[in-house]
Image (tube, rainbow, N blue to C red):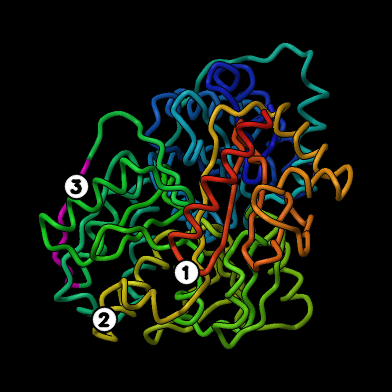
Amino acid sequence: MKFGTSGLRGLVTELEGRASALYATAYAQYLLESGKAKPGARIFVAGDFRPSSPDIMATCIGALKRAGLAPIDCGAIPTPALALYAMTHGAASLMITGSHIPADRNGIKFYRPDGEIDKRDELAITALAEQMADKNLELTPGTAPSEAAEAEAMFRARNEHILPAGALAGLTIGVYQHSTVARDWLVSILEFYGAKVLALGRSDHFIPVDTEAVAEDSIALFKAWTAEHALDAVVSADGDGDRPLVTDETGLPLRGDLLGLIAAGFLGAKVVVTPVTSNSGIEATGDFRVIRTRVGSPFVIEGMQQALDAGETAVMGFEANGGLLTASSFDKNGKALTALPTRDSFLPVLATLYLAKSRGKSLSALAGDFRLPVAAADRLENFPVETSAALMARLRASPDNLALFLKPLGGVRSVSDVDGLRVTLEDGRIIHLRPSGNAPEMRCYVEAESEEAALALLQEGLALIRAAA
């Protein structure tokens, strides 16, 4: 097992049973040894709707009990709801989720009492797990008291104070429910603000939805639904509800970094922290300072904390997948929106719909107003980690190797190696090659002047990667 860009990930066959007990025990030991929790302290546990999550939750609950903590079962709830509830109670938490990856994989996200663990925490937990790797571990599943209703009530209260009453009245919104734990929560919160809501596409089996690379069959569904029901938008989230999906009135998904940009303006942010994969036009579009990081919420959180340590205020961050994080408290609608330094899908959805409604514009027109370079992204699934590592090593070995690889696309103007290889071509187009941090996937991000040019560059880039495999 290993940590990726956000949490521990692996095949279900690897994570179920011993591995989940091992890492839950290691995390409990880390909390106790570091003074982040005292013996008998409460620790909150939740999960998503993938088939393996309940069993892994039960194994973790049993292990946490035996390690000296008092687990609380929060059920199947969105990750930001779990994080908010645990942090408000000054307690650590575990979220059992594989986020957007297929159901044959799963993972565990770890939260300290003050928020997500960082890379140093990951190293410490891994070291403790390695020390216990050869020991006999009891794997008996456990049960715990439930506070699912209380966690849900707290998160609903947060979201029901973000916008003015009736702020979305007159909008007709489709909620693509699939198998996200946010599916019923999105419906009720949008209805709370006066929108007419249609629940669509609910599934009893797990559907992996990647908000950063939306599948073509999903887009076809969105286009059919918006046309059939005259929808102003379709909204959704990934499996654990921490990454948003918003389409325009034609069913075309808006970029996650555009949702983050809109939310930054909505909040009145002064500092925005975002990875290098977010749109290159962000710096020119808002009245805030932009800090770029590597991909992954731990790096965004680290950048936000550095800004706070430097005395900055109104600090927030977002990722290209749309997940929004707040490091500062913001005043909205006459109430304090407390800091939530973990990905949240609800705030960017509400901010985007509200801006379109308040300006009397369709979402496609609103997106066009920002005049960002057209960006696109996709991934090659089941791309072995060893293959992607070998390709990246070859391309990094010399400028000539990279230039030869990209020759079919054009000459190289500049290269950034902050996270993967982000190349600006001589004609100004951008192509970014990056292996996934937690799955056997190779990702490709591009930017160009038009949608046609961006999609063409994306397909050409993916073709080069396939040919090099």
38 in relation to 129, above or below: below
Circle 1/circle 2 CB separation < 8 Å: no
Mark 1 surroundings: few (<14), some (14-19) or many (≥20) residues within 10 A = many
Which of the numbered marks, if any, corresponds to residue 200?
3
Q: Is residue 198 magenta?
A: yes
Residue 358 appears at what percent x and percent y? 28, 85
The residue indicated by pointer 2 is 361
> Please, what is the three-letter code of the amino acid marked with disc 3?
Leu
| Residue at (65, 45) in percent of width and height | 5
Q: Camera-side residue: 79 or 74?
A: 79
Choose the circle earlier in sequence order: 2 or 3: 3
Residue 223 appears at what percent x and percent y? 23, 53
Mark 3 surroundings: few (<14), some (14-19) or many (≥20) residues within 10 A = some
> Please, what is the three-letter code of the amino acid marked with disc 1?
Leu
Residue 182 appears at what percent x and percent y? 34, 50
What's the magenta bit mostly, secondary-structure-wise? strand
| Residue at (58, 53) in percent of width and height | 445
> Please, what is the three-letter code of the amino acid marked with disc 2?
Lys
Which residues fall within the magenta stretch?
Answer: 194-201
The residue indicated by pointer 1 is 258
441 in relation to 320, above or below: above
- Report the Cα–Cα distance between label 1 and label 2: 16 Å
Left or right? Give the position of 146 relative to 223.
right
- The answer to which image quadrant residue 425 occupies is bottom right
Left or right? Give the position of 374 relative to 252.
right
Q: Secondary structure under badge 1?
A: helix
Residue 102 appears at what percent x and percent y? 46, 30
Say if residue 415 shows up in the picture: yes
Q: Nearer the viewer, mark 2 or mark 3?
A: 2
Circle 2/circle 3 CB separation < 8 Å: no
